[in-house]
Amino acid sequence: MSRSSKKGPYIDEKLMKKVQKQKQSGDRVVIKTWARACQISPEFVGHTFGIHNGRIFVNVFVSESMVGHRLGEFAPTRTFRSHGRIVAREISKT
């Protein structure tokens, strides 16, 4: 279920303060965050975020096409290995 429209988008207050502070200083340091559920606002465009995926921080540069999405969408938590092992066994039997 999605968030109520009367509440507005969820944007982490601490993260917004860090972005505003970085805009004033002109510094371009990676902003580390654990707030994967935070929605990307237009103020985030042009900044790089280190989004925690449970193990490491994945660096994500925010562009205009990302506005409205969640930060966690761009830092996958699971590593896909492959489906090839089962297929390889079937090929070796024939």
Image: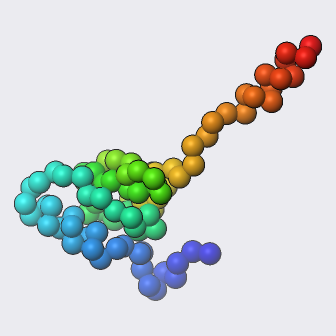
Q: Is residue 83 above or below residue 16?
A: above
Q: Is residue 1 above or below residue 52?
A: below
Q: How many numbered dots are placed on residues in this image?
A: 0
Q: Quadrant of residue 87?
A: top right
Specify whether 37 is left or right of 25: right
Percent of width and height locating residue 33 = 34, 62
Q: Quadrant of residue 38?
A: bottom left
Specify whether 13 is left or right of 36: left
Q: Residue at x 61, y 40 (%)?
A: 80
36 or 78: nearer the viewer: 78
Percent of width and height locating residue 37 = 46, 68
35 or 41: nearer the viewer: 35
Q: Residue furthest left?
A: 25
- Decide if residue 43 is in sight here: yes
Q: Is residue 4 above or below residue 45?
A: below
Check the picture and name the quadrant holding the C terminus: top right
Q: Residue at x 42, y 79 (%)?
A: 8
Specify whether 20 is left or right of 52: left
Figure coloring: rainbow
- Decide if residue 68 is in sight here: no
Q: Residue furthest right?
A: 94
Check the picture and name the quadrant holding the N terminus: bottom right
Specify whether 11 is left or right of 78: left
2 or 35: nearer the viewer: 35
Q: Residue at x 21, y 64 (%)?
A: 19
Q: Residue at x 31, y 54 (%)?
A: 49
Q: Is residue 31 above or below residue 78?
A: below
Percent of width and height locating residue 84 = 73, 28
